[in-house]
Amino acid sequence: MTLNKFKTFISSIIIITFVSTAAKSTEECFENVSRSVFKFNMVVDELILEPIAKGYNKLPKPLKQGTGNFTSNISTLLSIPNSLLQGDLKQFGHSTGSVLVNSTIGVLGFFNPAEKMGLKAVKEDLGQTLGTYGVGPGCYLVLPVLGPSTARDSFGLIADTFIDPFAHITIRENELLGISGNDMDYYSVKGTTAVDFRSKNIQNFESLEENSIDLYSSLKSIYLQDRENKIQNSKSDQDDWGNLDN
């Protein structure tokens, strides 16, 4: 896709998202529905995700770390087009260099030599990109299985599949540089990413659940603050999301 097409694409998304996210970021347009979905997600987490994450934590450290590096390297692919759309050429260079180095020298991303070389890739998605263009988050909502989101981020989640190179060769079933995949490849990696994230934050989630009067509201506040920090590239060590971030 050419740069002009990229600009047309992002402009179209901004127009659509402005229309669909007129509500303020703090407005709960679907609170009753979102709370019901949240309860469903908690059941799924308790019965499926958390037990798998605990089992994952028992894997040998090199295997677990390598798996985390592998999924992180694939996630960085999405940062490449989004950094370009944001006009952040420095981050575009870091993300591109990180993927190239880790995919080759790092054996398909199982190792992370790029970090030792000073290449610091920051995760970027279209929701963040829209935020840098001044698009507000709109209504807060909770998606089944996927968890907290906003109108802007939900739209970005779908639109990301059109610009993400990994989605391009898997769920879009196109070929890129002689590489292709299928739906199973895409969802397997996304599922593993979720398990890796959950495994790193078992204690954090337990602490949050024990100390929150209203867990739904606590996670909402944490999510919105984390998204704003990422848009502003101002995430600090004291960020409310803390280690609940992959």
Image: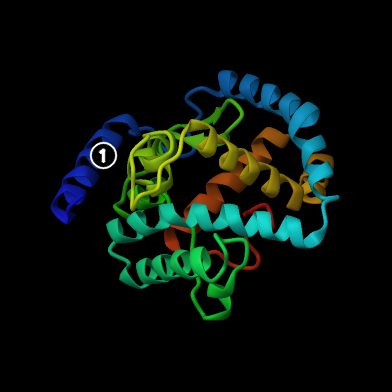
Q: Determine the residue positioned at 41% across, 42% down.
A: 180
Q: Amino acid at mark 1?
A: Ile
In front: 205, or 101? 101
In this view of the protein, can residue 244 be seen by the observer?
yes
Identify residue for label 1.
Answer: 13
Q: Name the residue: 35% across, 38% down.
A: 159
Farthest-out residue, left:
4
Q: Secondary structure at mark 1?
A: helix
Residue at the spot x=78%, y=37% of the render? 52
Q: Residue furthest front?
A: 178
Residue 208, compared with residue 36, is above or below; it is below
In the rendered view of the protein, which quadrant contains the C terminus?
bottom right
Residue 124 seen in the current view: no
Q: Is residue 134 left or right of residue 191?
A: left
Is residue 156 left or right of 242 when viewed as pictured? left
Give the color scheme: rainbow, by chain, secondary structure or one colour: rainbow
